[in-house]
Each structure stands twice: as C-alpha cells, then as structure tokens.
Amino acid sequence: MEFAWAAEDAEYRSELQSFLDTELADHWHGAVATLGSQENADYSRRFAGLLADRGWLTPHWPEEYGGHEATPWMLAVLGEELWSRGEPRGPQYMNANWIGPSIMAHGTPEQRDRYLPPISRGNAIWCQGFSEPDAGTDLASLRTAAVRDGDEYVVNGTKIWTSYGNIAEHCYLLVRTLPGDTRHAGITVLLLDLPADGLEIRNIPGVVGDHSFNELIFTDVRVPVANRLGGENAGWAVVREALSYERVGAPRWARASLMLDQAMSEVSDEGRTIDAVTVELVGRSRAACEAARLLCYRVIDERAKGLPPSHNANIARAAMVNAERMVASACVALGGSAVFEYGSTADHQLRKSLAAGIAAGSYEVQLNLISLNHLGLPKARS
Amino acid sequence: MNFELDADQDAILGAVGTLLSRHAGVERLRELGGDRPAYDGDLDGHLDSAGFADIAEPGAGNRLEAALVQEAIAMSLGSVASAYRLLVLPSIPTPIDGPVAVIPAGHSGPVRFAADASTIVVIGDHDVRLVDAVETTSKQTYTRLGWPAGTITDLPYGKVVADVRPSEVRAWVNVALAVELVGAMRFALDLSVGYVIDREQFGRAIGSFQAVQHGLAECAVALEGARWMTLEAAWSGDLTAASLALTHALDATELVFHRTHQYCGAIGFTQEYDLHLATMRLPALRAEALAHERPTAASVSQIWGVV
C-alpha cells in the first residue's frame, strides 16, 4: 500500500496541465458550461480534436483503433484534469470511456470501421437512449419495442432524460426485442443514426441547465438489423459491461472541488470574511471531495490490476454524491445573496448537485448494493 | 498508487494481529474495567518488545505502517496511548519512555492517560514542550467513555524540544486521533452489521429492512472515506491531509455513533453488549480532537489562507 503517483503518470499530468492552461484560457468558460448546449458541443469538437492529435482522446484504446493502451491510472489523470476544468470534451467523454470500447467488444467489423474512427478523431456526438418514462432506476423494465421486419427493426416507444439528444449524431439505444415482462432477457442494443424518420426530439426545459434533457419519441423508426450491437436479446450483458466502470468514469469530485475553489476565490476577491459556521462547512466539503477522490482511486487500482468490478465502485459513487451536495451547500453559504444571480457559482453548483444522486445510477441503488455486497446484509424483500 | 497491502505490510499486520489476539480485545478490556478501564501497561510492554512501538523511524515522513498497526490496536480496543507513541513521538527527537499524554498549551480539564503518563507533551503555538509527570499533580477522572483519563494540575512549563515545529506535531496528533476513530468505528460497525443480520423482528432479519440497510451503508461510505484519507495522510505527513482526514473522521463519527446504537436497539444500551466499548470512546476522541486546533478550520486556513 502506498499513495505515490508513478513517475510517468505525474509527468503526463504536468504535460496535460500545460496544454489545458494554454488551450482553455481563451476558449472555455470552465465549470459552468451548460450540458447539452450547442456551444458546448461545438467546442467539444475542437477540443476533442486537439486531444486526439496528441493521442490523449482515447489513450486507453488498443493501438489498432488509434489508442496506445494507456493504463487506467493515466485515464484517471485525464478524467480528473478535464472534470476539474468543467469537462471540455462535453459529450465526447462518453464515447471515449464506454461507447467506443463497447463497440470494440461487441461490434461487427463494419460497425467498428464506421463508428470508431470518428470517435477517436473527436468528431462524433453520441447520446444514450436508456431511461423511459416508466423505466428509470429499474432500467430492466424498459418497454421501447423493436419488432423485426425483414432486415430492419421497427422501433416504437419513448426515451426520456436523454442528455445531448438534441445535438447527437448517434444514439446508443436500448430496446425490448422480446415482448412481455421479459426484463433483462429481452433487451437489445441498437446503434441508431440521427436524425431518423419517425423520431421526434423534444427539449425538456429543466432546472439543471437550459438544454440538459430531451425526450425521444419513436414512431415506427426503422433501424437496420446491421446496426444491432451484439446478439438479439443479449443487450443487458453488453450494456452492463460497458457501464461497469462508469460509476467512477466521471470524477465529479474534481469538478465539485473546483467549484469550491471558485467560490472561495470570489470571497477573497471581494474582500469578504466568512463566519465560523461557513468555515466548518467549507472544510467538511473539501474533506468530502478528498474522500471521494481516494475512494475513486481505489476503484481505479482494482481496474489497473485487472480485478472484476466490485462494490467499491458503489461506495465511491455514493461518496461523490455526498461531496457534490456538501459543496453546493458550501457554495450557497459562501455566495450569500449572489445565489439569486442565475449562473453564479452558487446557483450553478446548486443546480448540478440536484442531478448528483440520479445520473449514473441513483444514490439509493448504490446504498442497496453496498448493503448487499459490502456489508453482507440480507437482500431486502420486495 | 497501490491500495493493497504489500508483503511486508501484510506480515506486519499478521504479527500484530497475533499479538493483539493474545493481549487485547474485548475480554482484556473488560478485565481492565470495560468502559472505565485501567491503562494496559502489559499491552504497551508487548507492543514495545515486539518492536511495534518504534515501527516508524524517528523523523520519518511516511508513517503508513505505524497507522496500519495502530488501526489494528484500535480495532482491538487497546487501552493504551500507542497512537501517540507510534505516530506522534517520531516527530520528537528526545527519547521518551512510558505512556504519554498530549495536550494543547493552556488546556484544562480531563485528558486521556494523564494519570498514567510518564511524560506530558504540551503543544503550544510556538513550541513543543515535555513535562515529566513526576513534576505534576494529576488525579484520575471518573469517566465512562472507555479510556483512562485524568486531570492535571500544577503543570510546569517543561522543557522545550529543539528543532520541532508545533504544526508538524499537531498534524501527527490529527492523524493519530483519526486512526483511533477509524479503528473504533470499524469495531462498532462490524458488530452492528452482525447484530442486524441475526436479530429478527416482524419475521425477518432487521438488516433486510431498507431503512436499516441504507443507514448502515451510509456509515460504511463515511468510514471508508475517513479510513483512506487517514492512511494517505499517514503516508504523506502532509498537514492539510491530516486536518482533512480528521475532519472527515469526525463527520463519520456522528453517523456511526448514533446509527449503530439505533440499530442495535436496547441491547446496545447494556454493559453486557460490547457496542458501547467502542462507541463511547468516540465522543472522548472527539473532545480531544477539538481541544487542539480545530482541524476543519485549520484545513480551510491551510488551503485558502483564511479562517
């Protein structure tokens, strides 16, 4: 047991920081970027392209797909540095982290040739068509139906809370191909190209960001069978594997820590003093971020050693939720009446923290899994 | 970065585990008085003769192995001042034999080990001083918080230790207290998890109720975070890391203290059940932590330069 960074990872971090300091200074407004905005998407293409030129967009990918098989620790450094600057890859972090690898693992040669190069060049925007109005945390109850008709599937149903649905060119779509209450056994993954005839995309005005969520309404949308990822009715295993590390793939603690720094910097710039109660809240919030950092590192260590995903990912994810919420409270306490200003640091962190316990698996599900797999408590009865 | 024990660390923990299984644990603590224990000089002696008391080299920046050993001692409910010996005394170049008590300058009121210590370490704003216990007057405090404690009167100024920064010693006190909190919390959580698995109400284990599960899972999240922060701080010796580790350990304490007692129900109120042997130590450690420079305010000052 020891906590030092390997020399090559420390060197990479330093090099990456220099690049980011230069590139982002004039082009990016940091942690208050709006999820799903056109501005965000446009910049992500420029930025992801620059990363790709340096071999930093998909460094962990195999060489044959444009990567150089970087270690999970190097990928963690990349994620940490980018999230602490507001994630300028925008939606493209999903492509690099799990959509691309999922296509590598389960795609046909044609699918790999078609979809992977744009991802590795930083020029593809994907969204994930998972949640439905009646299938959120219980994703296996999804009902969007895909019925085989010759060489095509005909898709009908509704997906909801789809970030980037308004700007994406592709959708990693979960559908039910076995009718009835077949749950995990009847799910298939389709790679849907957008726009598509019969697909209506509605913006859902939200409080997290102006264009954070969309609703995708499918009416007889035809998807070639050739766009199926993996086997028919075998989609649950495909997506479960793809997302196995995604609970810590987005190091939200790094962004929360940045927001706290920003709020403290504003206090300092304005020459304000802070009361003892707020000081306590600020210190405890930073401590919560540090706890989340180390708990995420423990998961990365498991991954680097080739161990299977464990309940430590659930612990890390729950700790990140706590950190984001505490930082939001601290930012509001520090900002005072500035919280009234839309887009202020306090306002922004408050809004982001709302989604902290929902995105990438609800907080309560994490607690269920920690109870079951870490503490060894008996399964709760339904 | 490696979150698993290496072979040496594994061997050290195996050896200290064997020692503790013979000379510490619930039964030993009950022999010593349970929640009002005497100081365990025998355990001190065994730790000393086996080489664990000096596991960190004098002046060592990395005291991770010492923290791991101390965590095991804390989980075994040792009634000794080993946390200070293993983690704080390596920062003090003067050789010190026997138990120590550590207090901030100007402290009044009960303090752990005061009546048993051979040396009182006094941490001031500008210096660190050693006071020979024979030069003080102290009396045992009647307390039921799981530690021997005493009140010191007539404390002389003592001898100033040369070439020691009070901030560094204070940081190691923070690490020492955080390790003790983590060890006691692990004992309490493990015991409570076992209890809710065994205890049935409404025809089922109470640990199968989601309300109980979530309460304990949140304890585990807080405790795991505090544990790794503490171990990293012991590895780095960084002042801010130490302040933040103790801050998070104190936060975790709030959850673990109340929830373990809540879920163990009335049996947790009794002296025959072991829970209180660990949980009642937590407020004592909290009081001691807050008697020194407040770790949370210190961390804010260390990071952002304000308080």
Image (tube, coloured by chain):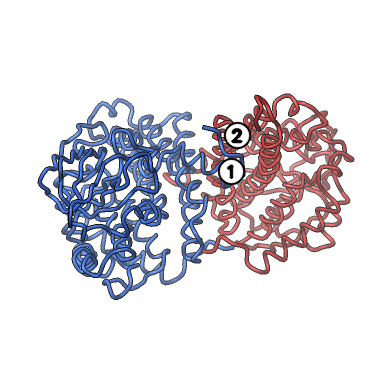
Q: Amino acid at mark 2?
A: Ser
Which chain shows up in red? B
Residue found 73% across the figure and 38% down from its top:
B278
Which chain shows up in blue? A
Q: Quadrant of residue B58?
A: bottom right
Where is mark 1, residue-wise? B223
Label 1 to label 2, Cα distance in Å?
Answer: 21 Å
Number of other residues with Cα within 10 Å of mark 1, as a class: few under 14, some 14 to 19, many 20 or more? many
Check the picture and name the quadrant holding the N terminus of chain A. bottom right
**Residue B208: image tag:** 2
Instruction: Look at the image and tell me whether residue B106 can be seen.
Output: no
Judged from the image, the secondary structure of the residue bearing numbered disc 1 is: helix
Q: Chain of mark 2?
A: B
Residue A237 vs A275, above or below: the answer is below
Residue found 38% across the figure and 29% down from its top:
A333
Q: Residue B216 placed where, x, y %?
A: 59, 36
